Structures are given as C-alpha cells and as structure tokens.
Amino acid sequence: MVRIGVYTTDFKFYHDVVKDLKRWRLPFVSLASLNVPDDVTVVLSSRKDDFDIPRQIKAENSMQAIRMSLSYLVAGERFYRVIIGIDPGPRPGIAVMADNILMEAFECPSIDKIRDLLSDIINGYIYENILIKIGNGDKPNRELIIKEIKGIAPIIIVNEKNTSTPHKIHDNALSAARISLIEDHYDCTRVPEKFSRKNVYEKEFITLKSVIK
C-alpha cells in the first residue's frame, strides 16, 4: 500500500495534518528524517519549512496539503479532470469526483459559506481541467448558489432526475456525488438494490478508499 509521508518543523501544521489524515482514513507515516521510504509517494510539509526533499508538497494548511496529495496516491502528479457536484438547497450537498473517483462528499452548512469551501477545493486539488455541475432542482437556492460562486470555475446545470433515490436514505452529499456523474440524467440502475446509509458510497461509486487499499 502506498503511503503519505509527513515531515515538517511546523508543530501546528503537523498536528492538524495528522488529525485530518486520520479523519480521512488515509495511510500515512510520520518521517523522522529526510530519508523517504519507497512506499511513500508524497511528503507533506508546511510552507514555512525551509528544506526541500523529493516528492514534497508544501501547503498553507492541512486540508490543502491532503487535497494536493491525492493525485499522487491514485493518478500520478495530477488528475486529468475534477468535477464538483452540487445539490442545490439551503444546505447544499458538495461532492468532488476526480477522474471518476469519489474523493469527498459533504453538506455545506449554508449557501453563504459555499464560495469559500469551493475555493479551498479548487485551490487544493491538482488537475488539468475542472468543472462544476449543479442540479436543476430548487431554483431559488440554485440561483443563489450560482450567484455566490460565479467566476471561480466553469459551471453547468444538469438534470438531477433520479439523484434522490431512494428517499429513505437520501442526503444532500449523496445527491451531489450523483450529480457530478451526470451527462444527460443520472442512471438509476447504478443505485444498488441492497445498501445502507453506511455503505451506500462504496456500493455505488469508485471511492478513494477502494482505490488505495
């Protein structure tokens, strides 16, 4: 299994990045020296660090570092295409699909916070192309979201039919993940017959967790 290395003299950065790597359940190792093991594909350091080592990423904060590292785990130095799916509503769902791998999916607490969250995503991942897909439902909130995020990346509106199936397990983040994959409308045959809220993402999508096992 490939691992992420952490080597920094910035205590706050180290504390934050280790906490977030554990939260993301990503394989990592804290390095005690500048010698990088062969199974470490990328090393995370703070922008404040004044040393350079092979396969190193220097970042402003832990989440930027983690997002910058993900392409090294699964795709080389960069993804070809990152798609951000948005399920419109007062608490928008947000999902990030990178080269058809679901990287993250979560619910934004409010529309007024969505621009900052998307900016962090856009400035974190390393990619050649990026696109935002927003579902065509909830027109009032959809228009508020588009107004809020206008100019940060190309945006298209897609037909979100079938993205809330089944209603008993529906959540905004799940719908956003489905929206990110839409070309015409979401293929509901992708939805597994048997699943739970706990395993729906693993059943329905190629996830980061499944790729780096």
Image (cartoon, rainbow, N blue to C red):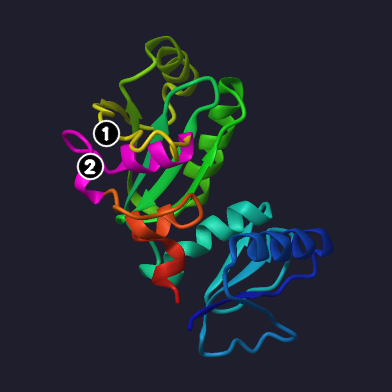
Specify the amino acid type for callout 1.
Asn
Q: Residue furthest left?
A: 184
Instruction: Work out whether 60 lies above or below 52.
Output: above
Q: Distance of mark 1 from mark 2, alpha carbons?
A: 6 Å
Q: Residue at x 42, y 19 (%)?
A: 146
User: What numbered label is drawn on residue 207?
Assistant: none
State the residue in front, 27 or 178: 178
Instruction: Work out whether 24 lies above or below 52.
Output: above
Instruction: Specify whether residue 102 is painted magenta.
Output: no
Q: Residue at x 44, y 63 (%)?
A: 208
Query: Seen in the image, is 2 located left or right of residue 33?
Result: left
State the residue in front, 84 or 36: 84
Please tell me how crowded label 2 is: few (under 14), some (14-19), or many (20+) other residues with Cα within 10 Å: some
User: What numbered label is drawn on residue 188?
Assistant: 2
Residue 22 shows up from this direction: yes
Relative image position of residue 127 (x, y in whole percent) = 37, 53
